[in-house]
Image (tube, helix red, strand yellow):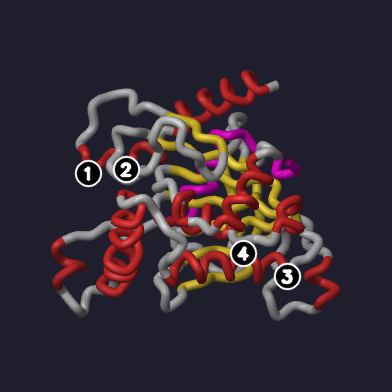
Amino acid sequence: MSQNITDKERVEVAQKEYEDLKLREKVKVIKSDEKEKTIGIVSKINNKSTGEQSYIITDKYTPPTASISARNQVKELTILYKGSTAPSKANIMDTKHPEFKDVRNDWLDNDIPTAIQITNGGGPTVTFQLKSSAETLKQAMRLYPNAQVYVYGHSLGSMNAQYAIADLDKKDINRISGGFFYQGPNIYSNLTPKQQDTIKAINALDRLFNFVDRKDYVPIGYGIGDPTIGHLIEIESTKAQLLNNLHNTSLLNSKKIFILELKYRKSTV
């Protein structure tokens, strides 16, 4: 992997999916020495009718409209898939609320149908948001053909990221330098046999990492011995937390994630 940042800093990158980033904005993390490191620059923002919201970040500002020559020079590509908009009485009931459409797209059209599917044994029929997320990744890889790719997602964004990688042609998986999924359901059972075969191949490369805290209500489908998209790394919240806060605080528990992934990697060397 050429994206030379720590596991703790990767959590900071994933958190950026919830920020209101702008085109041409530098995406930065704070390193252990308190200095800033630039991950890349926002080159495209997706806000699709399917509810998918994602950022395309390149090592230098290179929008999809740039010349082929310029796009060929991009060496590193990062995709952030945003998680679900948190539901509230206001944004569910008020049709004029700015988050009304987002909440319905995320929960009614994606989260709930996928959860029902997973708890009933899965199946290869998936939501339009998962499909559009897969197209986002494939299109970005076509636009920047020489770039190594990093994919991040939390919650619904984790599902989008998992599915996007699974839907790649097997010939393209070597371009995936890292996939980092936080607190999302296990959608392996929702994949086709071809997609599952792709995941088996990329899992063997040790480039995908799937972090879950079982105290959270969102990461479902992780039964003992069940196959997963990426290496499953379990974290535990360090103190009693209210159920409605755990889903977000687990992502923020970056120190615990860093320690556990480090232990995992040492055990596999």
Q: Position of residue 73 (x, y in %)?
A: 83, 64
CB of mark 4 within 8 Å of CB of mark 3? no
Q: Earlier in the sequence, mark 1 or mark 3?
A: 3
Please state which of residues 226 and 237 is positioned toward the viewer in this rendering.
226
The Cα–Cα distance between marks 1 and 3, rounded to whole angstroms, is 39 Å
Which residue sits at x=64%, y=20%?
266
CB of mark 1 within 8 Å of CB of mark 3? no
* Neighbourhood count class around disc 2 (C-alpha, 10 Å): few under 14, some 14–19, many 20 upward: many
Q: Nearer the viewer, mark 1 or mark 3?
A: 3
The Cα–Cα distance between marks 3 and 2, rounded to whole angstroms, is 34 Å
The Cα–Cα distance between marks 1 and 2, rounded to whole angstroms, is 7 Å
Which residue sits at x=41%, y=40%?
251
The Cα–Cα distance between marks 4 and 3, rounded to whole angstroms, is 9 Å
Image mark for residue 63: none
Image mark for residue 142: 3
CB of mark 3 within 8 Å of CB of mark 2? no
CB of mark 4 within 8 Å of CB of mark 1? no
Please state which of residues 198 and 205 is positioned toward the viewer in this rendering.
198
Q: Position of residue 20 (x, y in %)?
A: 45, 63
The Cα–Cα distance between marks 4 and 1, rounded to whole angstroms, is 31 Å
Q: Is residue 14 above or below residue 100?
A: above
Which residue sits at x=70%, y=80%?
65
Image mark for residue 244: 1
Q: Secondary structure at mark 3?
A: helix
CB of mark 1 within 8 Å of CB of mark 2? yes
Residue at mark 4: 137
